[in-house]
Amino acid sequence: MITVPVLVAAPEGYAQRFVEALKACNTDRFCFEPISIPLIRTTPCGDVSKIISQAQDYDYMVFTSRKAILVLSDYLKKNNISLDSIRLPKACAIGKDNEALSLLDITPAFISTEPSLKGIADELRNRFKEFPQHSARPRIAVLGPRVEGLTEPDTVPNFLRELHAIEADVTYITAYITRPATEQALREAEALLRDKIQWVAFTSATEAQVYKRLSHNTKPTLACFGPYTAHCVRKEGLNVRFTSPDYSSFSAFAKHLKEFILSTSENA
């Protein structure tokens, strides 16, 4: 039996889904032991109300994460705003996050071939070619995080630059705030890294930034959800051993990580 303790560093919600994906890979010969201690925390931001009051001002709204979709859905519920009473713009999200658009009773305008913000930008670039030259610039609302207490990763700023490059009229709306985890959570993570953890799985660069702050003597092996996460994690000076070739879902990440561990253990 190969047993692999994995620290899942993703924030709440994401962490639970990833833990379930890891456990789904377990067999009588192989066992992931996922331990969830989020290294970052997210809190909703009231700015998300702008997409409701200004919905008619946009052609598209892009959610940079599933969290942004959930925040908008929760806001509507808490304020007793019926989906029938508003007309939201055409929407899209990254990969499997598109499934969460059903919470807003929305069918994705499209699902990009590459499950990333760059993939969305490429798809929008192709669609904007169809806009008549004399028409107004396509208007896009982008809903995502505001990062506090950490350095903002390149991913969202690069996406906004790509949208500006294709002459879109872009408005960024803060849906939630991302901050480092509480001191208690960080102490728990430090203890686990000393005593048990073999792998740390990152789904974002902000998790890696907090990981760097932890004081631990061991050096677990690092895995990343996909190439964009891996790029940002390497910029933090960390050595990434594994990057999932399929970053469309947590299930794909878990499956490929298992295959990598098995192949390296067999070759050891």
Image: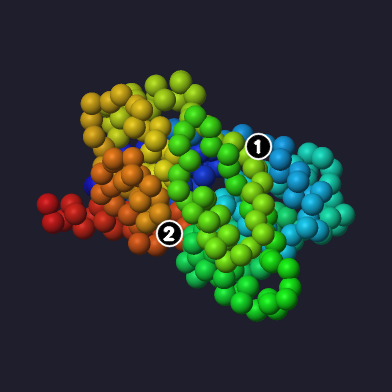
The residue closer to the viewer here, 132 or 5, is 132
Residue labelled with disc 1: 44
Q: Quadrant of residue 255?
A: bottom left
Horizontal side, residue 262 vs residue 115: left or right: left
At x 45%, y 37%, the residue is 151
Residue labelled with disc 2: 247
Q: Is residue 120 visible?
A: no
How packed mark 2 is, by other alpha carbons closer than 10 Å (few <14, some 14-19, many 20 or more), is many
Residue type beneath disc 2: Tyr
Q: Earlier in the sequence, mark 1 or mark 2?
A: 1
At x 19%, y 54%, the residue is 264
How packed mark 1 is, by other alpha carbons closer than 10 Å (few <14, some 14-19, many 20 or more), is some
At x 72%, y 64%, the residue is 59
Tag count: 2
Specify the color scheme. rainbow
99 in relation to 236, above or below: below
Residue type beneath disc 1: Pro
The residue closer to the viewer here, 98 or 49, is 49
171 in relation to 49, above or below: below
At x 30%, y 30%, the residue is 193
SS class, disc 1:
strand
The residue closer to the viewer here, 230 or 263, is 230
Q: Is residue 129 visible?
A: yes
Which residue is farthest left? 268
Q: Quadrant of residue 209?
A: top left
Q: Nearer the viewer, mark 1 or mark 2?
A: 1
Image position, residue 64 (x, y; %): 57, 52
Image position, residue 123 (x, y; %): 56, 70
Image position, residue 66 (x, y; %): 58, 50
